[in-house]
Amino acid sequence: MEWLHCISYFFGGAFLGNAIPHFVSGVMGRPFQSPFSKPPGEGLSSSTVNVLWGFANLAIAYLLICRVGDFGLRSTADVAALGLGFLLMGLMGARLFGRFHGGNSPADANARSR
């Protein structure tokens, strides 16, 4: 069942990566996109909603990482699964939120160079 643990750690990393921008934006008092905005993922949610959403993601990450199997910081497979989920969620967030916050997608870079 080790591969099931790795899948859990992968999704734990994804939830951990998703918790950071929501929680930090909320703590800074800034509105940010969330699934609860109108339209979902595009409109802005209040800083309070983002703190709560970030904390919920953190709680889910804890459950998936710390309560499933026996996550080991010295286990390459465990850390690689968590890191891959964290990285992929970060890249997805950069692409999605970059559209709204002046991120640097390849299309934006080409338009600015003209």
Image: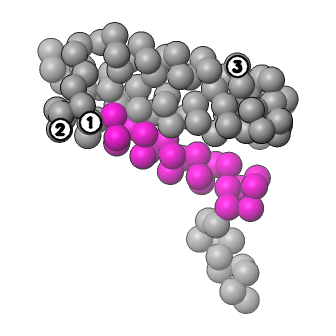
Quarter holding the N terminus? top left
Residue 56 higher or lower than 92, as above or below: above
Residue that appears at 67% across and 22% down: 53
The secondary structure type at the circle numbered 3 is helix
Nearer-N-terminus badge (1/3): 3
The secondary structure type at the circle numbered 1 is helix
Residue 43 higher or lower than 107, as above or below: above
Residue that appears at 59% across and 71% down: 106
Q: Where on the picture, by quarter, is residue 26?
A: top right
**Measured Cα–Cα span from mark 1 to mark 2:** 5 Å
Residue that appears at 60% across and 17% down: 56
Q: Residue furthest top?
A: 67
* Relative horizontal placement of residue 78, taking residue 14 as reference (left or right): left
Residue 20: numbered disc: none
Which amino acid, mark 3? Leu
Which amino acid, mark 1? Val
Expressed as whole percent of the image width and height from the top left, the position of residue 42 reads 77, 40
Is there CB contact under 8 Å for labels 1 and 2? yes
Which residues, given as a range, are shown in magenta? 82-103
Expressed as whole percent of the image width and height from the top left, the position of residue 71 reads 25, 22
Which amino acid, mark 2? Thr
Residue assigned mark 1:
79
